[in-house]
Image (tube, helix red, strand yellow):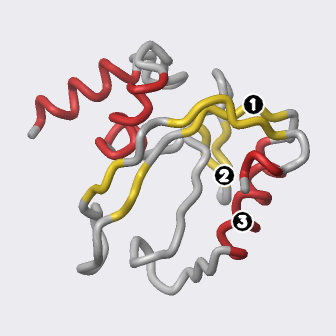
Amino acid sequence: MIGELPGVTVRRTSAFRSTAPVGGPPQPDYLNAVAEIETDLPPRAFLDKLQEIEKTLGRECNERWGPRTIDLDIILLGDLKIDEPALAIPHPLMHQREFVLEPLCELAPDIRHPILQRTAAELLAALKNLG
């Protein structure tokens, strides 16, 4: 559905991974992946389109970090930094989430976090060293 949006091209996707949820109430495992996307949409407009897809697929926001049908996030957008109430780029928790960093490393291990100035591979290695 994302690739069908006007002005959006999905370049590649990682493999899908089943992972246990992080935080929130007890819930089933999630299926996670990362996609490399090219778009000429402004960041807020792109997020709005992603949220429309979530709604179409039955997402309901009943509980923070609770079970959900789908969760589409913008993780990085080049070197862009945005910190607004409804949109934060880079994603503020990406460096703490193995389920984000592993598939990101599959596609772009050398991509650099624009605030932390570390690569995805470095962030993943640091996270794994904590556990």
Residue 96 percent coordinates (x, y): 31, 42
Q: Which mark is residue 38?
A: 1
Q: Say whether disc 2 or disc 1 marks the residue closer to the N-terminus.
A: 1
Residue at left offset 58%, top offset 82%: 60
Q: Nearer the viewer, mark 3 or mark 2?
A: 3
Q: Which residue is mark 3?
A: 53
Q: Which mark is residue 78?
A: none
Q: Which residue is mark 2?
A: 87
Q: Quadrant of the C terminus?
A: top left
Residue 1 percent coordinates (x, y): 73, 56
- Which amino acid type is marked by label 2? Leu
Q: Are marks 3 and 2 in contact (CB under 8 Å)?
A: no
Q: Gap in Å between the C-alphas at discs 3 and 2?
A: 17 Å
Q: Which element is circle 2 on?
A: strand
- Which amino acid type is marked by label 1? Glu
From the viewer's perspective, tell me whether residue 118 is left or right of residue 35: left
